Image: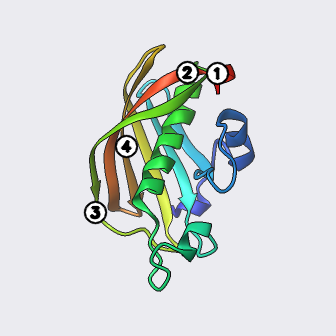
Amino acid sequence: MEPNKRPFIFNAKDIEKILPHRYPFLLVDRILEINLEENEIIGLKNVTVNEPFFQGHFPSVPIMPGVLILEALAQTGGVLVHQKGYVKKIAVLLNVTGAKFRRPVLPGDALLLYAKAQHISGNGGKIKAKAMIGQVLAVEAELSFALVDKDQL
């Protein structure tokens, strides 16, 4: 089933209730699946030509910046952390390891954001993440994060 035709669990307004990010830095449009027993989540980012970063990032051949793909993966992981019960905390990115950029992400792509928690505790954790365009791997990385109280931000 095409990503935009799949049923979703959370839309952008629901995600705004969980994450502190707002336009233009809220980079997850929907949450499609959550499996709390397996510590897995799938999000969706519809990449459009109207994204503000395309004006300056290779404007003649627009490519989504890799750091923003990593941020979208981290935000997807942040929703998972919230759903695991850390509702009074925010996941703050600490470290990115093993990042590999396999395919450019272009306007019109539907970016599926997969995150699987390797470890989560009250202090932080680690997520293995990948971004896919259909069945094609675009980006993969391990993301470490700290958990901080929402009222400290």
Spot occupied by residue 89 in the image (x, y as percentages of width and height):
60, 21
Q: Are marks 1 and 2 in contact (CB under 8 Å)?
A: yes
Residue that mark 3 sits on:
102
Q: What element carries label 4?
A: strand
To which quarter of the image does residue 55 belong?
bottom right
- The residue mark sitting in front, 3 or 2, is 2
Residue that mark 1 sits on:
152
Residue beneath the point at 53% across and 34% down = 78
Residue 129: numbered disc: 4
Cα distance in 3D space between marks 1 and 2: 7 Å
Q: Is residue 27 above or below residue 1?
A: above
- The residue mark sitting in front, 3 or 1, is 1
Residue that mark 2 sits on:
148
- Crowding at dot 3, Cα within 10 Å, few <14 / some 14-19 / many 20+, comes out as few
Residue beneath the point at 47% across and 77% down = 62
Spot occupied by residue 4 in the image (x, y as percentages of width and height):
59, 62
Residue beneath the point at 64% across and 21% down = 152
Q: What element carries label 2?
A: strand
- Crowding at dot 1, Cα within 10 Å, few <14 / some 14-19 / many 20+, comes out as few
- Mark found first going from the N terminus, 3 or 1: 3
Spot occupied by residue 38 in the image (x, y as percentages of width and height):
41, 28
User: Which amino acid is tagged 4?
Assistant: Ala
